[in-house]
Image (spheres, rainbow, N blue to C red):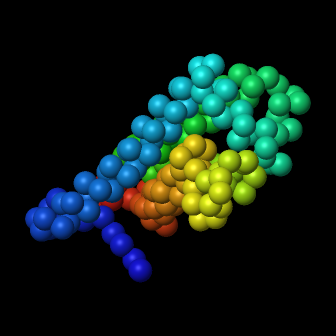
Amino acid sequence: MMTRTITNDESTLPGDKLANLGAAVLRYGLAAVLVWVGLLKFTAYEAEGIQGLVAHSPLFSWAYGVMSVRAFAALLGVIEITLGLLIALRRVSPRLSAFGSIGATIMFLLTLTFLLTTPGIWQPAYGFPFLSPMPGQFVAKDLLFLGAALWSAGEALRATGPSGFDASRTT
């Protein structure tokens, strides 16, 4: 299924306006959440909050042997802030926005592996598919963020066009 962004001069249908508004909320909401959560990674409570997720992950647990909990959280924060800012650059540079969106896609795929590795993801006494409120539902929200990042990457790449930039697509 192919979708496209409708500019204001192409249509005045309420559905088109809502779709454009939704696209903007997806992209810039994703960017804002990444920057916001990235900034929080510099706090002690956030670093401690992700410690259990990271410590039980075969993909990330090695990091605590190389750096402190706070240092690793800060590194993640820098990555999240950078990706959020790149995604937000869509109007200036669709190519950079696509790069940030692809990076976010990879990040969300990696964090979704916590569903498989973190104790307490599934509600005790019920198991799959009953997610625990924390950390289960906390991690599951990354499915939506993954979808937003994939959409943002695809739309921004489409906007670069064969010449590398297409100013007619300005979502």
Residue 128: horizontal and vertical position, in percent? 64, 64
- Quarter containing the C terminus: bottom left
Q: Quick check: 92 left or right of 42?
A: left
Q: Quick check: 130 left or right of 28?
A: right
Q: How many marks?
A: 0
Question: Residue placed farthest to the bottom in the image?
Answer: 1
Q: Nearer the viewer, residue 160 or 50?
A: 50
Examine the rendering and report whether any part of residue 15 can be seen.
yes
Q: Nearer the viewer, residue 165 or 77?
A: 77
Q: Residue 62: name its quadrant.
A: top right
Q: Quick check: 109 left or right of 58?
A: left
Taking the spot 53% from the left edge, 26% from the top edge, the residue there is 39
Question: Residue placed farthest to the front in the image?
Answer: 125
Residue 14: horizontal and vertical position, in percent? 13, 65
Question: Residue placed farthest to the top in the image?
Answer: 44
Residue 68: horizontal and vertical position, in percent? 79, 23
Examine the rendering and report whether any part of residue 93 can be seen.
no
Taking the spot 20% from the left edge, 66% from the top edge, the residue there is 16
Residue 48: horizontal and vertical position, in percent? 67, 26
Q: Nearer the viewer, residue 143 or 2?
A: 143
Give the answer, above or below, for where 109 lies relative to 74: below
Q: Quick check: 147 left or right of 53?
A: left
Taking the spot 12% from the left edge, 68% from the top edge, the residue there is 13
Question: Residue placed farthest to the left in the image?
Answer: 12
